[in-house]
Image: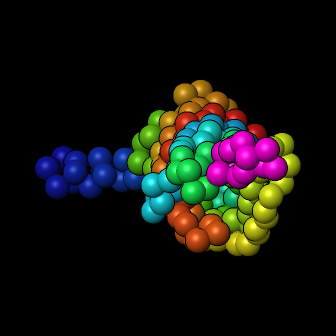
């Protein structure tokens, strides 16, 4: 066999092996459930402290690289650090105002299977949020709305159905401010 024929044969073997891997790995729709925890902070206001948050994603990958994502999220209190944002009761004692953010949403996720164990992704979300301000164990203000979010992250499958993920996310214009989030989570494929 001459050199050109061997290269063609080798290339065809590689291509057929890659197609067999793709057909075996991504032939059926995949459902991924992914809880994650992280830290959220307003990006353009210095008076807020960071807050912990919990997020649960349910993603259905209809195509190997494209999926539809549903999520629920809940943030613990963002505390306002400035004295101007404190609530005074009738006895003139000051109490910091805490903000609680929660909501649900839908998104579209695209991933790039760079390697079977490294899968970067991007996601665009629509977040239907509710914001509540509390002081003295009662609600002193409410706001709600919808915002667009963009995320970039990476999934690291460790076993056939279990993996971990890390992501950075920004939601735009939540009650006048942008919220940045960093999260670590687990992935469970079904």
Along the viewing direction, whichever of 78 and 183 lies nearer the viewer: 78
Along the viewing direction, whichever of 48 and 28 lies nearer the viewer: 48
Find the magenta span and give its range.
Answer: 86-97
Q: Residue at x 78, y 62 (%)?
A: 141
Q: In this view, does 77 lie to the left or right of 41?
A: right
Q: In which quarter of the image is the C terminus?
A: top right
Q: Position of residue 156 (x, y in %)?
A: 51, 36
In the rendered image, the residue lying farthest to the left is 3
In the rendered image, the residue lying farthest to the top is 159
Along the viewing direction, whichever of 111 and 75 lies nearer the viewer: 75
Q: Is residue 155 above or below residue 142?
A: above
Q: Is residue 171 left or right of residue 145?
A: left
Q: Is residue 139 above or below residue 154?
A: below
Q: Which residue is drawn at 37% across and 47% down?
A: 14
Is residue 87 highlighted in magenta? yes
Along the viewing direction, whichever of 122 and 63 lies nearer the viewer: 122
Q: Is residue 136 left or right of residue 44?
A: right
In the rendered image, the residue lying farthest to the right is 138
Is residue 109 highlighted in magenta? no
Q: Residue at x 72, y 51 (%)?
A: 88
Residue 184 visible to an observer of this rendering: yes
């Amino acid at each position: 066999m001459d050199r050109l024929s061997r290269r063609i044969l080798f290339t065809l073997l590689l291509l057929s092996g890659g197609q067999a891997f793709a057909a075996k790995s991504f032939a059926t729709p995949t459902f991924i459930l992914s809880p994650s925890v992280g830290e959220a902070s307003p990006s353009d206001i210095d008076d807020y402290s960071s807050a912990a948050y919990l997020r649960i994603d349910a993603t259905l990958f209809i195509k190997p690289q494209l999926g539809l994502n549903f999520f629920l999220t809940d943030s613990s209190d963002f505390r306002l650090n400035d004295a101007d944002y404190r609530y005074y009761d009738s006895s003139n004692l000051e109490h910091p105002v805490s903000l609680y953010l929660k909501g649900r949403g839908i998104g579209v996720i695209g991933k790039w299977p760079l390697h079977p164990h490294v899968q970067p992704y991007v996601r665009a979300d629509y977040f239907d949020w509710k914001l509540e301000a509390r002081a003295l164990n009662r609600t002193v203000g409410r706001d709600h709305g919808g915002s667009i979010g963009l995320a970039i992250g990476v999934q690291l499958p460790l076993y056939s159905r279990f993996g971990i993920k890390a992501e950075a996310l920004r939601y735009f214009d939540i009650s006048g401010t942008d919220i940045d989030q960093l999260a670590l989570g687990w992935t469970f494929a079904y």
